[in-house]
Amino acid sequence: MTSESLVPIVELAGVDKRYGDGPLILDQVSFTAKRGDFVSLIGPSGCGKSTVLKLVSGLNPISGGRIVVDGVEPSKAVEKLAFVFQEPTLLPWHNVVHNVELPLRLHGTDAAQRTELAKRALALVGLADRMDYYPRQLSGGQKMRVSIARALSVSPRILLLDEPFGALDEMTRDHLNEELLAIRQQLGWTAFFVTHSVAEAVFLSNRIIVMSANPGRIYSEIPVSLAYPRTEETRQSPEYQKLVAEVSKILRSVERLKA
Amino acid sequence: MTLAKPRRRVPRLLVQLLPALTGVGMIIGWEAICLSLSADQRFLLPSPAEVGRAFVEKGPALWSAAMATGGGALIGFGLAVTLSFLIALFLSLSPLVRASFYPYLMILQMTPIIVIAPILILWVGPGLKSVVIITFLICFFPMVVNTTQGLISTDRNLVDFFRMCKASRWQEITLLRVPSALPYFFTGLRIGATLAPIGAIVGDYIAGNSAGGQGGLGFLTIIYSSQFQMGALFATAAVGCLLGFIFVAGVIALSWLALHKWHDSFSRSDA
């Protein structure tokens, strides 16, 4: 492990969030992510886990506390961040390659270079042969892959994923989880991943943050020490299954807290 | 008849022929009604054959009137499309802008054209100018409403995505809001296209030819009705109807060009 990998890339210190005069959504949320961390955020609905991502992305301002992304405040870190939404959120009137290069286009990258980068990102998600397709011609899993390629096109250092595989069937989801880890192995970004699925969180992350709701707080953090690269075999291993059971138990106790 | 009975597939050719067959049936029915009328009632309803004869006799007049009306309708419609789009862009800027201007657009729409027409004639004089303005007034409103609705209905996640990419307001409008409003825009256009020829005929009827220039279908209507030329009136109505079809077909073709590649309204059910 190099010394650089110990430097925090994302730091939240006592972050509060409320919308207008509304109730407190996040209450004193603090945690630090190191370079290369894969952090999953899990918790009952309404615990503000998606809100954490939106704050880190710089889309919404915080109400209190401090967020530092790679040394600067989130809104200044746009070029280092990429966001993957719950839905593929592709532009239906653009074909696959134009969708993937869109963030580069918005940043003002010249046409030749952005096509090149888009092609590379599409190759990573295995859709190099679907460049001219329109979103409606793709399956749900393929659309999500395009959405991930779009996020990767800007070569982000931090990837924010807001429950990206929630709408997919289990087979596709497992498959995409493996692909996501394989791509991370190559590119080495830091990931924040919001999910409802304990199995998914354990499979992907080296750290799982469990949140409680009303207001959103960090309830506990569970390190996942399974070695990378993780594959289909990882899911069969007793350690994996033990962790899934353990996290599920914690999640249940959080949900009881809510009730 | 039981509901559970499996439906037999209707042959494709028959499906395509059915509208034509219905038309032929209706014409036969119409001719039959005409034959059953007494001699002194007959002038009230011209038979299909008489309407056909009127078409031939009045052909040149109908043609030039259709061109005049079609031209006026096209200019008025074109103006309405352009202006409605610009105004919709303006209205989409903020709810405050909409709240401030919408009521006045409504008033414009609610004011009866028949009352505005004489004012217009006094302002711009009779003839093409008045026809164009009346056409514009009639088809403008539904297009503004639809396009505005489209511009403010952009997918929230896509807007967030653009903002996360630090897209400029201009980029957000041109690359996101306008393209995603296109289906709404074309819905408005389709309504406008059915109204434009009607608007031009009404305009022509009220303000068309009092200056002595080339009259349109509205002017022909005045002449034929004053002379009780029922066959010619029916022919004029048919020409107006045809004009409407041409406008709508034009808009459908345009929307096909703009949308067929990506929008679900043009996806084949088997795709």
Image (cartoon, grey):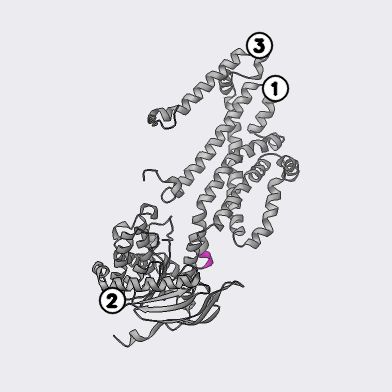
The answer to whether residue B139 is visible is yes
- Badge 1 and badge 3 both on one subunit: yes
Is disc 2 in contact with disc 3, using a CB cutoff of under 8 Å? no
Asked if residue B251 is positioned above or below residue B159 in the image, the reply reads: above
Residue type indicated by callout 1 = Gln
Mark 3, residue position: B39
Residue type indicated by callout 3 = Ala
| Mark positioned earlier in the residue sequence (1 or 3) | 3
Residue B269, x across and y down, in percent: 39, 43
Parent chain of label 1: B
Between disc 2 and disc 1, the foreground one is 2
Of B141 and A248, the residue lying toward us: A248
Residue A81, x across and y down, in percent: 42, 74
Q: What element carries label 3?
A: loop
Asked if residue A56 is positioned above or below residue B79 in the image, the reply reads: below
Magenta segment's dominant SS is helix
Query: Residue B73 lies in what quarter of the image?
Result: top right
Boundaries of the magenta span? B167-171
Q: Does the magenta stretch include residue A177?
A: no
Residue at (58% x, 35% y) in the render: B67
Residue type indicated by callout 2 = Leu
Q: How crowded is mark 2: few (under 14 residues within 10 Å), some or many (20 or more)?
A: some
Q: Which mark is residue A226?
A: 2
**In the current view of this chain or complex, which residue is farthest to the bottom?**
A3
Residue at (61% x, 51% y) in the render: B145
Residue at (70% x, 49% y) in the render: B108
Q: What element carries label 1?
A: loop
Parent chain of label 2: A
Of A130 and B209, the residue lying toward us: A130
Mark 1, residue position: B227
Spatial CA span between label 2 and label 1: 95 Å
Q: Is mark 2 on a helix, strand or loop?
A: loop
